[in-house]
Image (spheres, rainbow, N blue to C red):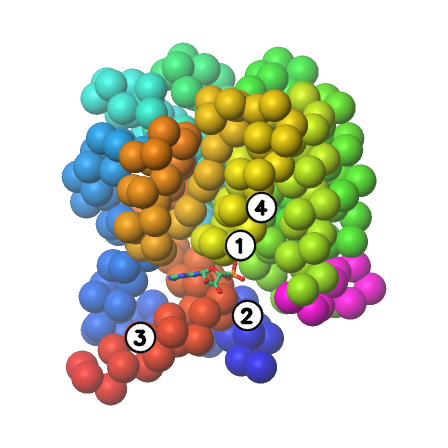
Amino acid sequence: MLRRPLLAAARSTRCRQLIEHAPFASALIERFVAGQNLAEALPAISALAQDRLVTLDHLGEDVTDAETAEDTVQAYTQLLAELDRTGLAERVEVSVKLSALGQALPQDGERIALANARRICAAAQDAGTTVTLDMEDHTTTDSTLDIHAKLRADYPWVGAVVQSYLRRTEQDCRDLAAAGARVRLCKGAYDEPASVAYRNQQDVDRSYVRCARVLMQGSAYPMIATHDPRLIGITQALAVESGRGLEDFEFQMLYGVRDTEQRRLAAAGNRMRVYVPYGQEWYGYYMRRIAERPANLAFFLRSLVTR
Ligand code: FAD
C-alpha cells in the first residue's frame, strides 16, 4: 500500500531536500550506503571482498546537464584507478546508471551516455574489471539495452540488468541469453504501470522463475539478484538442472540486506556478489529500499522520532 507513495517521494525534489539535509541523514543511511565518498567506503569494500565479490555504485541518477554527467565519468575513472592500485579490481566491478551519464539530456542524451559509458568501460578494462549497466524505469529499457549491445561490440563483458516485473523481460532474456551476455536478473524497483508491468507479487515471482530458466538454459552468465529465499532455492535447482556448476552463475544482494545469508552462500562455494552504493546522491536509492520492505520503513520512522 505504501510502496507507490514512497516511490513517488523517491522522485520528489521537495522530499529530497527535506530528508537529504536533515541532521540525522548520515546516521539514517549507514545501513544501506557504505560511505559518502570513496575513502569512507573503502574499509567496508575491502572487508566484503575477503569472502565475497562486490559491484560498486557511485550514487547518482537523473542527471540533467552535461557537466554533472562528466563529473560522474570522472568519479568512476578515479574509482577504477583506485581499485587497480589497491588490487581490489580482481574482486570488485562497478555498476553504472545511464541516467547519471546523460541518457535523459534533451539534446543527444543517448549518444552522450554511450560515449560516457565507453570511457568508463575503457577504464574498467585497464583496471582488469567489468561494468554492469543498472536498469532504471521502463521508459529507458530500449535505450539501455541498445547501448548495452553497442558497448558489447568492444567490451563483451559488459553486463545488463533485466526486471522480472516487466512483461517484456522474458523475451529480453531470450535475446540476451542468445548473445551470451552477463545478465543480472532482479524483480524491479520502480513504480510501473500495469500496461507494461505485472503488479501482483506472485506474477512478478513467476516471471522471475521463467526468466531465470531462460538464462540458465542459454549461454548467458546469470546474475541472480534477489534476497528472496524461495527464488534462491529455485534458481539453485535450475542451475543444477541446466548442468551449471557453482562458477557458472552468481548470486547478488544489496549491501546491508541479509548479510548472514550472503556469508552462508559464499561459504558454501557460491559466487556471491554484494551491490555496494556510496556517494552523496543517496536519496533515490535509499527511498527505493524503504519502499521495498515495511521493516525498513519502521526503521526509518524510528530514526525520525528518536533523534
Ligand atoms: P522482495 O520481494 O523485496 O523480498 C522477498 C523476500 O526476500 C522477503 O519476503 C524476505 O523473505 C526476503 N528479504 C527481502 N529483504 C530482506 C531483508 N532486508 N532482510 C531479510 N529478508 C529480506 N532494481 C532495478 O530496478 N534495477 C537494478 O538495476 C537493480 N539492481 C539490483 C542489484 C542487486 C544486486 C539487487 C539485490 C537488487 C537490485 N535491484 C534493482 C532491486 C530489485 O529490483 C528489488 O527491488 C529488490 O532486490 C527487492 O526484491 P527482492 O528480490 O529482494 O524481493
Question: Magenta span has 198?
Answer: yes
**Element carrying mark 1:** helix
The residue sitting at 21% across, 73% down in the picture is 23
Q: Taking the image as drawn, is residue 159 in sight? A: no
Q: Taking the image as drawn, is residue 264 in sight? A: yes
**Element carrying mark 3:** helix
Task: Give the camera-side residue of 171 and 80.
Answer: 171
> Which kind of residue does numbered mark 3 sit on?
Phe
> Which kind of residue does numbered mark 1 sit on?
Arg
Closest to the camera, between mark 2 and mark 1, is 1
User: Which residue in the protein does label 3 denote?
Assistant: 299
User: Which residue in the protein does label 1 denote?
Assistant: 230
Judge: label 3 CB < 8 Å from ligand 1: no
User: Which residue in the protein does label 2 denote?
Assistant: 7
Do labels 4 and 1 touch, CB within 8 Å?
yes
> Which kind of residue does numbered mark 4 sit on?
Ile
Q: Position of residue 69 (x, y in %)?
A: 50, 41
**Lower position in the chain sequence, tag 2 or tag 3:** 2
**Lower position in the chain sequence, tag 4 or tag 3:** 4
Mark 1 vs mark 3, CA separation in Å: 25 Å
